Image: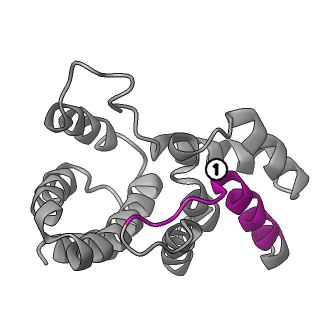
Amino acid sequence: MSATCQTNFLSFVTVQHGEQKRKYTGEPYTVHLVAVAECAEANNLKFGYEIGLCHDLFEDTACTDQQLRTALEAYGYMTNEIDFILQGTWDLTDKFISADYPNFNRKQRKAMEVERLATISANSQSIKYCDLIDNTKSIVRHDRNFARVYLTEKANLLKVMNKGDQTLHELAVKNTLS
């Protein structure tokens, strides 16, 4: 897809995330989305830029599947491309959240999420590695107490989420051992 389409699509995602900020730095949340998208694109992942931008869209905004589909159509994406991007976005959307599973604690929800993420496509797993790499940098730098919990969760995830790009997987594992 052209750089213009991607720029327009970034504007759409930016509007959807509104005034959201990164937890520790106060930067616009899109800084993280762009980091994930650029990592995915640099590693030649199929529609990695688009899926990287959207990986938190459904869990962090009011954007619907249909709104995303309509935006992608407006920016010139073909139906099969849109379907692929939507599937990748849904793959990376947490399913086991506290609002939907109030009787489960974080550890239980994360264990269910690990099982689910082990089954998503290699492309989606690779984009998830980019997400983990970027999040790990921020959490380790800014919240050492939570980092212990987070790094354990990520190590458990990476043991079973191993179908993706092996270079990115190794980098995600290395960063998890930080």
In the image, taking residue 59 as reference, residue 54 lies left or right, namely right
Residue under the image location 33 percent in, 64 percent down: 132
Could you say where residue 12 lies in the image, as x and y percent from the top left? 76, 58
Q: Report if residue 18 lies within the magenta region.
A: yes
Residue under the image location 31 percent in, 55 percent down: 163
The amino acid pointed to by label 1 is Ile
- Magenta residues? 5-23
In the image, taking residue 112 as reference, residue 21 lies left or right, namely right
In the image, taking residue 169 as reference, residue 24 lies left or right, namely right
Look at the numbered disc 1 and give the secondary structure of its residue: helix
Q: Main secondary structure of the magenta part?
A: helix
Nearest to the observer: residue 160 or residue 108: 108
Exactly how many numbered labels are in the figure?
Answer: 1
Nearest to the observer: residue 122 or residue 147: 147
Could you say where residue 111 lies in the image, as x and y percent from the top left? 18, 37
Circle 1 residue: 85
Q: Which quadrant is home to the C terminus?
A: bottom left
Could you say where residue 118 lies in the image, as x and y percent from the top left? 28, 43
Q: Report if residue 59 lies within the magenta region.
A: no
In the image, taking residue 172 as reference, residue 51 lies left or right, namely right
Residue under the image location 68 percent in, 42 percent down: 83
Q: Does 42 appear above or below 26?
A: below
